[in-house]
Image (cartoon, coloured by chain):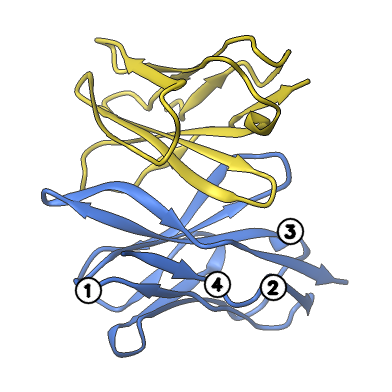
Chain colours: A yellow, B blue
């Protein structure tokens, strides 16, 4: 069974540009979570999608947004990139709210 | 507010020695608790979880953890460490929402080094 897959693996963008990160959950999982792992800041919750709807978001500005598609895959968009957005972005999926979340390998975003 | 504390930033052990990584959480109700491991440049792999029931939980790779409500702790243990266990370990608590959780609150992580 395929795990959570994220693309691209690495992404280099210029400050002010937009970045789009993609995530395919484990088959059958309907919840998708996004986390940011920035140097020195640890793992921070970004967004939670469940059944196609954004259910919760962390303490991030509105330029961090995303969506979940009917097949439960998800994308994270980061607009007006800033240098401090450089981080590993991790996607996770779970079958339901009371089951464990499985993580993908992440997308390393570098803003120059 | 929920929070997770991992008091040890770095730990070094010799191969074959026992290991205990500490985790303390702050939350009023019975939490959902997890331990994840991250190798350099990789994503997170779930080692074990506690939702309810037996307070001693077994995980993959020979790891176990014990939930102690009175101490608000969920320490991770392994009786004999292998060189391949060198990685960063994260304790996390699920933020409860409508019968489950809707996000994970992570500790800062403990980086484990293993001497041959």
User: Which residue is farthest left?
Assistant: B98
Dot 1: element: loop
Same subunit under labels 4 and 3? yes
| Cα distance in 3D space between marks 2 and 3 | 8 Å
Label ID, residue B81: 2
Residue identified by numbered label 3? B84
Q: How many marks?
A: 4
Dot 3: element: helix
Looking at the image, residue B14 sits to the left or right of residue A9; the answer is right
| Picture quadrant of residue A111 | top right
| Cα distance in 3D space between marks 1 and 4 | 18 Å
| Cα distance in 3D space between marks 4 and 2 | 19 Å
Same subunit under labels 1 and 3? yes
Residue identified by numbered label 1? B28
**How packed is label 4: few (under 14 Cα within 10 Å), some, or many (20 or more)?**
many
Q: Is residue B81 above or below residue B107?
A: below
Q: Are marks 1 and 3 in contact (CB under 8 Å)?
A: no
**How packed is label 2: few (under 14 Cα within 10 Å), some, or many (20 or more)?**
many
Dot 4: element: loop
Depth check, mark 4 against mark 3: the one in front is 4
The chain containing the residue under callout 1 comes to B
């Amino acid at each position: 069974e395929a795990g959570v897959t994220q693309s691209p693996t690495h992404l280099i963008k210029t400050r002010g540009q937009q970045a789009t990160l993609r995530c395919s959950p484990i088959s059958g999982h309907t919840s998708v979570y996004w986390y940011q792992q920035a140097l020195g800041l640890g793992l921070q919750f970004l967004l939670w999608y469940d059944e196609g709807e954004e259910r919760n978001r962390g303490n991030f500005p509105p330029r961090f947004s995303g969506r979940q598609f009917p097949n439960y895959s998800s994308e994270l968009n980061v607009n007006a990139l800033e240098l401090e957005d450089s981080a590993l972005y991790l996607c996770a999926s779970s079958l339901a709210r009371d089951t464990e979340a499985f993580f993908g390998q992440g997308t390393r975003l570098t803003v120059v | 507010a929920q929070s997770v504390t991992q008091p040890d930033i770095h730990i070094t052990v010799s191969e074959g020695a026992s290991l205990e990584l500490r985790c303390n959480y702050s939350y009023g109700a019975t939490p959902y608790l997890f331990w994840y491991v991250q190798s350099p440049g990789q994503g997170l792999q779930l080692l074990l979880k506690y939702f309810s029931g037996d307070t001693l939980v077994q995980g993959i790779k020979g790891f176990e953890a014990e939930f102690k409500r009175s101490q608000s702790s969920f320490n991770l243990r392994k009786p004999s460490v292998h060189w391949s266990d060198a990685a960063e370990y994260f304790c996390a608590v699920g933020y409860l929402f409508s019968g489950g959780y809707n996000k994970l609150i992570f500790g800062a992580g403990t980086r484990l080094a293993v001497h041959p």
